Image: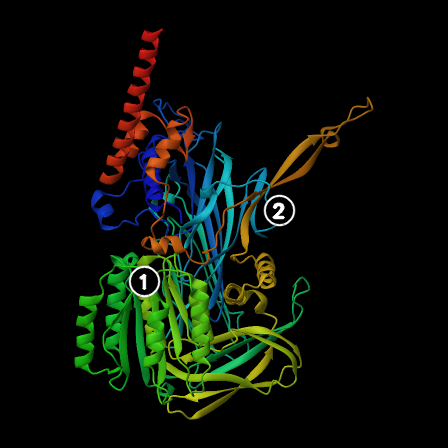
Amino acid sequence: MADQEEFVKSVEDGLRLSKRIYFGKDRAVAPPKQMALMDKAASVDSYFPTSPMMYAVIDNPAIVDNPDIPSYQPHVHGRCNPPALIPLQMNGVSLEADCYFDTAFITVKGSWRLHCVMSSRSCACRIAVPMGEQGSILGVEVELPQKSYSTKLVAKDDEQETKKLAKIEDGCFLKPHIFTLTIPEIGGGTNISVTIRWSQKLLYRDGQFTLSIPYSFPEYVTPAGKKMSKKEKIQFNVNCGPGTEVSSKAISHPLKEREDEDEDGKVGLFYEADVLKWSSSDVIINYKISSHNYQGSVLLQSPQQEDTDQRKLFWCYLFPGSQECRKVFRKEVIFVVDISGSMKGKPIDDTKQALSVALSKLDSQDLFNIIAFNNEEYLFSSSLELATKEAIDNAIQWIDMNFIAGGSTNILNPLKQAIGMLSNAGESMPIIFLVTDGAVEDERQICEFMKSHLTQNRTLCPRLYTFGIGLFCNHYFLRTLAMMSCGHYDAAFDVDSLEVRLERLFSRGSSIVLANIAFENLDGLEEFEVYPSQIPDLSSEGPIILSGRYQGVFPEMLKAKGILADMSNFSVELKGFRCKAIPLDKERVKQQIQILTAQAWFTENKDLEQKIAKMSTQDAVVSEYTRMALVETERVRVIKPTTKRKVHSDAEKIEERIIQKTILLHYLGFGFGNLTATIENIRPGAIKTEDEVEIIAKATSNCCGKLCGLCCCCRCCIRTCLKMNHECAIALAQFLGALGCLGCFTCCEYCCCEDAN
């Protein structure tokens, strides 16, 4: 993650620099206002983008001016370090969302102008893309008068693409849901057209899907000048396939239903208007798929010609039905919670709050226990307790007293204890909730241990619901544990979302209505591959959506069976439909890549890694085995060499050539855990940077240079010293004192030698 505090400071400096821009004598025109001090104190995130944004990256403040109306500006000494970020004015924007059940593909087209740099100068511009729930960047395209830029994914081991390595801030995540990309050298006054594409998940609650798209533009991106109307366009499309009935409701913007969408499973909403200022609220839209009982179907499709896998595609979904059909399983629940030193502060406080809420929602017939762990284990009870009000009150008090962050991380022992406590009666659903923010060395051994205990002869094997906090834990290890047990995995990459997401996972695991789901009548298929291979349980908190590949003749009615909460058998027939309107190959590719990456990590299969890289580059979905590259395409006019003396027209002398250059951006994956950060108990969200003493040592070895973008003058060295803790300052003072003594010793030795001569 990029330095978030530095970004906020850069935007503050940029808004301050904006006051230099002269917009003419019109008193109605004023530079953008900075946030009041009270507002800053109330919201640390005040300058983080809440909509697609573009910023001018200003190193030299002297270039800031109106490109149309040059004005006298007092000379500015020095440079901006870090560079200031001036939000650019936006001239037009359109948004289109295509939704397929729980996934939305978003396309935003915007037009910005570099209004704050002299026409004779240029600067880089940074694009910021905030994405919604589980957002994944798919691509960015930028059009300039003589150049264009576009992103693409390349395999990490593709040496042909590593022609030029970009700076770290040129393509990175500012936050887990905010992607930033820097476009180099754009001239002042240039109009910039940008197309941004990403995918995100929809939330599901009470049979209703909710889509929330970041679309709240700050006031200072509205073009300066007299009130002029600007065109804003929003289009929303839903396609859930044939055999479904979709009803929608727009909340945030006045969307109207399109009359041409009269097919089953389709809804189209549209909004276009001339506005005086841009939207100040996110786009929020709800839609519901009518379902009175367990409902589902199968969508079938042939692969595209360019698809590397030519097996046919299928897409299967199953909804939990209405409230009266949702009898949930009686549960045996064990909460296994990490309380190591890195959980100190907000992570452990939010975990305690979410756990207290989960305990209060247990049924009085449920059994529960709590295991807190670091390098030791702390048990609430030696055996499972009935979830009475008294037991839950005691558990909440025990949490307050024993959830004290400290120590290292050991996951295997508490999981062994949890497995040993669960009964083999088969009359209730055994569930283990694992919450951690760290990585451990024996993760594959833990998976092997859990796999051996999950395959024991029992009607209901233990379900693992795993939750990762931050970027230092191995999220693929946690996903593997969940997949092999028919459970679920979730994560809070940003600590601010921890409590909400953890409560959501607890709620999903506590509301299982159909278990041990499997497919029948697949004898006519030569091949059948489904993601995930172990079908998770159906919860009243969300549908099951599966995808995969097959060869052969797919049955007209696919039969799914399972076990209901009263331990009775259940089966439902899912009708198959041929569907060309939904891009099945792209709709579930992110889920497939994540599942396959977990398998590749667990099995250490290199062939599987290459398969993932091919899927990633083909469908433009970021993976652990690909990197994003920025392709610069420049249109250059070249004069043709002529051998004859005959006079040629300009059209005959000049031709246009296309020159491409690839800039390889930095790694965008989350990785496979950080053992060093876990051992050192670095808190989630922290960025481990180079030691300040090492910076000074390197800087003083070349006083005329710069290191890591820091000036090595005395003022900057003093500023670095002020950031040191007391122990580091004492160590540095002792080191410098020793150097002084060494200098005196050398001088004395030299003087003695001179006297002797």
The reply, left or right, for residue 752 in relation to residue 303 is left
Farthest front residue in view: 756
Q: Residue 159, which numbered label?
A: 2
Dot 2 lies on which element? helix
Q: Residue 463, which numbered label?
A: none
Closer-to-camera residue (537/117): 537
* Colour treatment of the image: rainbow
Farthest bottom residue in view: 568
Q: Position of residue 379 (x, y in %)?
A: 25, 73
Return the residue at label 1.
498
Closer-to-camera residue (157/81): 157
- The amino acid sitting under disc 2 is Glu
Q: Position of residue 488 (x, y in %)?
A: 41, 72
**In 3D space, how far apart are the residues under numbered discs 2 and 1 (Cα atoms)?**
39 Å
Q: Nearer the viewer, mark 2 or mark 1?
A: 2
Q: Residue at x 31, y 58 (%)?
A: 496
Q: Position of residue 84 (x, y in %)?
A: 37, 36
Closer-to-camera residue (82/726): 726
Q: Is residue 326 above or below residue 170?
A: below
- The amino acid sitting under disc 1 is Leu
Q: Residues within 10 Å of mark 1 (few under 14, many from 20)?
A: many
Q: Residues within 10 Å of mark 2 (few under 14, many from 20)?
A: few
Q: Is residue 746 above or below residue 732?
A: above
